[in-house]
Structures are given as C-alpha cells and as structure tokens.
Image: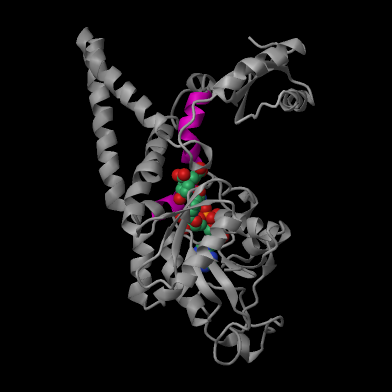
Amino acid sequence: MELRTVLVVGTGLIGTSAALALRKRGVRVLLADRDQGAVRLARELGAGEEWRPGGPHPAQPGDPAAEKPGRGHVGPAGEEPGPQDGRATEQADLAIIAVPPAHVATELLELQRLQAARFYTDVASVKAEPIHRAAQLGCDLSAYVASHPLAGREKSGPGAARDDLFLGRPWALCPTAEADPEAKAAVLRLIELCGANAVEVSATDHDRAVAVVSHAPHVAASAVAARLADATDVALGLAGQGVRDVTRIAGSDPGLWLGILSGNASPVAEVLEAVAHDLADAASALRALAEGDGTATGEITQLLKRGVVGHDRIPGKHGGPASSYAVVQVVIGDRPGQLARLFQVCDEVGVNVEDVRLEHAPGLPLGIAELSVQPDAAATLSEALRERGWQVP
Ligand SMILES: NC(=O)c1ccc[n+]([C@@H]2O[C@H](COP(=O)([O-])OP(=O)(O)OC[C@H]3O[C@@H](n4cnc5c(N)ncnc54)[C@H](O)[C@@H]3O)[C@@H](O)[C@H]2O)c1
Ligand SMILES: O=C(O)C(=O)C[C@]1(C(=O)O)C=C[C@@H](O)C=C1
C-alpha cells in the first residue's frame, strides 16, 4: 500500500528519525508533539510540516473556539480540532505514535476520535501493555498494528534524530487478531521505506525477547555505570574502550527507561535474576581464588566461555548470521584527509569495509584505524596498503 501522507505524533528521537527517513523517500510528513519546541526543531531539520488538525488557520486568542476543552496532547495548542463533527480536516494514510509507552493508548484513542489517519502504529519499546490498554479504552484495533524498531540511541529529542537510524535494523510488528490486513500492509510499507527489516511476532513473545536483548542489558549497563559515579579520578583517567562499550546505553533518559522497564517488568526481572545469579557465582569464585582455592578458576572460565558463545550468536549487520570479520590495523596520522586516502585504497582493490573503528591516543599525532573486512580480503588489503606506504603492523 502506498503511503502518501504520514502523521508523526511525538517528534523526539524516534518520531523525527522516522519522519526524516520518510521525507527522504518523498512522503509528505505532518508533525505533532505536546512540546511545540520539539515540533519546531523537527520541522527545521526537514522532518516535515506542522500538523494543523483544524486546517491552515489557527484560532486566535479570544476566539471562542480557543476556549473549548482541549484534545489531550495531540497537535498544536490553541487550534480547533477540525470541522464541527470533531474530525481532522485531512486524514493521513498512517499515524506513527512515537511517545513514551504509557501514553500510546491515550494518544491512539484521541487520534482515532479525530479520524486523523486511516491506520495507526506506535513504536514503543514494549508491546503487550499498550495494546491491552488500547483495547480497554475502546480503541479501534482493526486500524492499529503495534510496532517497535530495534534501533535507537542514548540521546533523546529531535536533535539526535538520524534519517538512517533504522537502516538494516529489525523492526518488530505485532498485529492482533482484529487487525485489518491493510493496516498491516501500511506498517510494512513504513518499515520498508525506513530501510528496516520487518519481523512479525506476537506482543507477548516480543516483550519476552526484548527483555533478553534490550531491557535487561540496559539495566546491567546502568549497574556497571553506577559504579563509576564515585570512582576515583585515577580510575576514570584509565577508562578505555571496554567500559565505554559496556556503558554507552546507560547514558539514556531515565524517565523514558523507567516507563519501558515498568511496562515489561516481569520478563525483565526474570532475566536480571539469572544475570544476578551468574554475577554472584563469579564473585564467590573470585573470593575463593583470592583465598588460595585454585579450583575456583573453573567456574570463572565457564562463565567467560558462555559469554563468548552468547556474544557470537548476535546476528551481524542486516540481521544476517553473525560474521567474524578480519581486522586490518593501519597506523594513520592525525591529519585531515587520512581516512579518505585509506578508503580510496580499499576502493581501488575492491575490498568492502564492513566496519571501522578509530583508536586515538590522546596527545599523540598518530592513531590506529581498525578496518573490519571479510577474512579472505584481509591479506589483499594489507598488502595493497603496505605497497602504498601505509604502516600495517
Ligand atoms: N530511544 C530509543 O532508543 C528507542 C528505540 C526504539 C523505540 N523507542 C520508543 O520510542 C518512543 C519514543 O522514544 P524517543 O526515544 O523518541 O523519546 P524522546 O524523548 O526523544 O521523544 C518522545 C517525544 O514524545 C513527546 N510526547 C510525550 N508524551 C506525549 C504525548 N502524550 N503526546 C504527544 N507527544 C508526547 C515528547 O514531548 C517527546 O518529544 C518510546 O515509546 C520508546 O519506548 C525508543
Ligand atoms: O542503541 C541504543 O542506544 C538503543 O537504545 C537501542 C535499543 C536497543 O536496546 O537495541 C533500545 C531500546 C529500544 O526500544 C530499541 C533499541
């Protein structure tokens, strides 16, 4: 099904990223948020135009229309809801509700009351609870297919949005038995336009799955990062990439995450209990080791090995099977244009760079670029780089 006009309600990180991706594909996007500053910034970033459910002429202060009871949080303040029957003047093909999980159902109800769109989805990180609440409120479930892109950042708001945020990422959709096939087709088209991979799953299975791959890892990252709050300056001065990798997501908005964790409390608690068990066992094994019990190394090795097995099961990019890339390390000068020259060589020898990472030693004029490539391309690339004078250790 074609999406000509999409309404985005909640122009934060996810809503604005989806809007930017849709704009890039030529879709008309209407923007609404209870925070007018968020709408303005999204609009200035090129994410679309402000949604005016009552048409192009905002009600003026003092106009009896402006004194009418509000319409919840949807749309710009001080405007008429639409024609006299309460409908929006224009109906979008699809509305994306990109607000915190606890507000999804009330926004859906309000948007459906306005007949703001033909079909509706949301992007909340939990699925069973918003669907259950929507049913309780009497929303039209035939026009609604809940969804969740498995892509995000540790930053909030439209300023952090990226049009390529969803490229190659899984995007779960959880149609209920009541869902109209056309509503599902609309959400599938959204996912396709954003460059993501659709994964159909029931809401309950989704919530159990993301407890393992997203929500419990988030709490674990917060617990590790919390240790740093009163770490000494010496310790923080020694922080390398490891702690940065493990704690990146701990920088996220606590308010949003409280809502996510509360909406998926039991499945997350179950995973955390298992993690806590492993951590407690590792701590007692280390205590035993410190007291001279050499046999305790077995338990620690087992956990580390199970970690390697789990890590290797994470799918590679584009959701395909996990790939083990070879890493070619190259010494680069801290000067403009070095990376461009390096990529030029990769291009010349036809080697695709799957990933790149830069290691910079503060204060040193040199750094290391780590290029991840297919294992059978590593030797060709290393040789080509050496021939052209690059230092490949
Ligand atoms: N942050 C992530 O990495 C991530 C990834 C995937 C999905 N999600 C989900 O996407 C949704 C939005 O998260 P985000 O990271 O974009 O948050 P955000 O804080 O960047 O944006 C949320 C926006 O919603 C607005 N808002 C809140 N309540 C509203 C309401 N009732 N009506 C209209 N606007 C309202 C806020 O003003 C804000 O602009 C959440 O449900 C979250 O679970 C987040
Ligand atoms: O990478 C991040 O910063 C995220 O927050 C991403 C992440 C995830 O855990 O993968 C977090 C929560 C969302 O619901 C979806 C994606």
Q: Nearer the viewer, residue 123 or 178?
A: 178
Q: Is residue 167 left or right of residue 59?
A: left
The magenta span reads 241-259
* Residue 191 visible to the viewer: yes
Numbered disc total: 0
From this view, report whether residue 42 is shown above or below residue 222.
below
What's the magenta bit mostly, secondary-structure-wise? helix
* Spot occupied by residue 243 in the image (x, y as percentages of width and height): 47, 27
What residue is rendered at 59% in x and 25% in y? 373
Instruction: Give residue 360's quadrant in the image.
Output: top right
Give the colouring mode of the picture.
one colour
* Spot occupied by residue 6 in the image (x, y as percentages of width and height): 61, 68
What residue is rendered at 34% in x and 53% in y? 207
From this view, report whether residue 261 is shown above or below residue 3.
above
What residue is rendered at 41% in x and 77% in y? 140
Instruction: Give residue 19's quadrant in the image.
Output: bottom right
- The quarter of the picture where the N terminus appears is bottom right
* Spot occupied by residue 300 in the image (x, y as percentages of width and height): 28, 19
| Magenta region includes residue 357 | no
Q: Is residue 372 left or right of residue 207?
A: right
* Spot occupied by residue 173 in the image (x, y as percentages of width and height): 44, 59
Q: Nearer the viewer, residue 346 or 363?
A: 346
Q: Is residue 337 left or right of residue 309?
A: right
What residue is rendered at 64% in x and 64% in y? 39
From this view, report whether residue 363 is shown above or below residue 134.
above
Q: Residue furthest right?
A: 336
Q: Is residue 232 left or right of residue 136?
A: right
| Magenta region includes residue 251 | yes
* Residue 97 visible to the viewer: no
